[in-house]
């Protein structure tokens, strides 16, 4: 059984991790490559990109309708967000066939088994995890992605999808990306369910900031959504100056990150800002996560 290298030695130089990636084969080493990319090289970007990737899936009416019926986003949006983020981070940090990875997949499959979810919707959500972070880093990353990183992301999430029982996952990177683009063109449209799940998610993002800043954060969220998403949610466009400020701020951040030394410790499953499970992963197992687990907090 292949497992990721849990404690790879820190390479020398700012491009040390990139040199390591160049030496690995995505066909056999995609889990290790993806852990380096998401945990060492671009942890902040991956977290932000996956937040908006999940947001993007709520533009599909069948997905938002199911989420609204469950009531999870209305009653426990922070917990729903933390459960998803941490379970996926466990897979990245430890590998999908590791003991913690297997336990995480068991929890994901158990949550999904409670509902009648269309395979095509599951496939679409998987595609956003595989490709949205790549698109984000293309725009805002501190360095260009290596082709090995792109292929590793596709192969990693394809492996996850197969273990989730998702059918008809394309075997080719471009075919899967094309599926994603076509699915959005065909399925994105405004519904009241989209709007309400969008509002709950937008308000969740705003809740992470002091109350006086929340109106500006709300406009910042709108600035990060493309026209296709805003139409599906029924959200207004942000002022042009806000969009410019947001994009320039992200570019400026990438320029600053470029000057930092290589990261010595993976941050894939270590989010100090998760509100539901303080200190995670210390003292927690993946089985502690999920919509059926309240842990005295949800």
Image (spheres, rainbow, N blue to C red):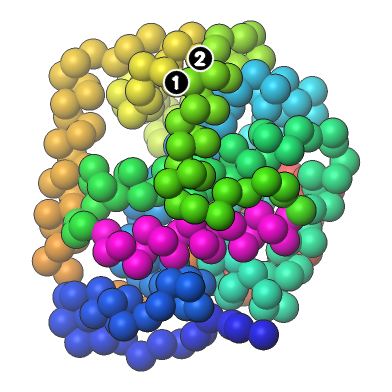
The Cα atoms of the two marked residues, 2 and 1, are separated by 5 Å
Q: Position of residue 210 (x, y in %)?
A: 40, 34
Q: Which residues are magenta?
A: 145-164
- At horizontal 85% and vertical 36% (from top left) the residue drawn is 115
Q: Position of residue 219 (x, y in %)?
A: 33, 20
Q: Judge by depth and name the residue closer to the eye, 19 or 258.
A: 19
For the residue carrying disc 2, how many other residues have a C-alpha within 10 Å: few (<14), some (14-19), or many (20+)?
A: many
Q: Position of residue 286 (x, y in %)?
A: 72, 65
Instruction: Check the image and name the residue furthest to the right.
Output: 114
- At horizontal 79% and vertical 29% (from top left) the residue drawn is 70
- Residue 231 on the magenta span: no
Is 121 situated left or right of 223 in this image? right
Callout 2: helix, strand or loop? helix
Is 170 situated left or right of 122 in this image? left
> Where is residue 89, by image quadrant?
bottom right
- At horizontal 49% and vertical 9% (from top left) the residue drawn is 234
Residue 221's mark? none
Helix, strand or loop for the magenta stretch, by majority: helix
Residue at image mark 2: 232
Q: How many marks?
A: 2
In this view, 245 is above or below 297: above
Residue at image mark 1: 229
In this view, 38 is above or below 241: below
Q: Judge by depth and name the residue closer to the eye, 287 or 116.
A: 116
Q: Is residue 13 in sight in this rendering? A: yes
Quadrant in which the C terminus is drawn: top right
- At horizontal 28% and vertical 77% (from top left) the residue drawn is 22
């Amino acid at each position: 059984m292949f497992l990721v290298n849990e404690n790879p030695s820190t390479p020398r130089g700012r491009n040390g991790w990139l040199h390591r990636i160049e030496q690995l084969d995505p066909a056999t080493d995609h889990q290790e490559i993806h852990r380096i990319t998401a945990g060492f090289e671009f942890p902040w970007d991956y977290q932000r990109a996956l937040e908006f990737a999940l947001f993007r899936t709520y533009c599909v009416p069948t997905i938002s309708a199911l989420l609204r019926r469950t009531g999870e986003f209305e009653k426990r949006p922070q917990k729903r967000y933390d459960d998803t983020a941490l379970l996926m981070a466990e897979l990245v940090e430890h590998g999908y066939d590791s003991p913690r990875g297997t336990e995480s997949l068991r929890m994901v499959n158990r949550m999904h088994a409670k509902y009648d979810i269309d395979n095509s919707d599951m496939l679409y959500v998987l595609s956003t995890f595989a490709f949205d972070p790549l698109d984000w880093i293309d725009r805002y990353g501190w360095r260009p992605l290596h082709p090995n990183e792109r292929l590793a992301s596709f192969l990693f999430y394809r492996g996850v999808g197969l273990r989730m029982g998702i059918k008809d996952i394309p075997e080719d990177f471009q075919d899967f990306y094309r599926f994603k683009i076509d699915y959005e063109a065909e399925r994105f449209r405004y519904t009241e369910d989209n709007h309400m799940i969008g509002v709950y998610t937008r308000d969740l993002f705003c809740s992470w900031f002091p109350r006086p800043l929340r109106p500006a954060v709300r406009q910042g969220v709108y600035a990060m959504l493309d026209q296709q998403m805003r139409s599906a949610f029924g959200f207004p466009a942000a002022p042009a100056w806000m969009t410019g400020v947001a994009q320039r701020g992200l570019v400026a951040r990438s320029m600053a990150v470029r000057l930092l030394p290589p990261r010595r410790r993976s941050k894939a499953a270590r989010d100090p800002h998760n509100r539901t499970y303080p200190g995670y992963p210390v003292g927690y197992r993946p089985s502690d996560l999920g919509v059926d687990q309240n842990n005295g907090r949800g």
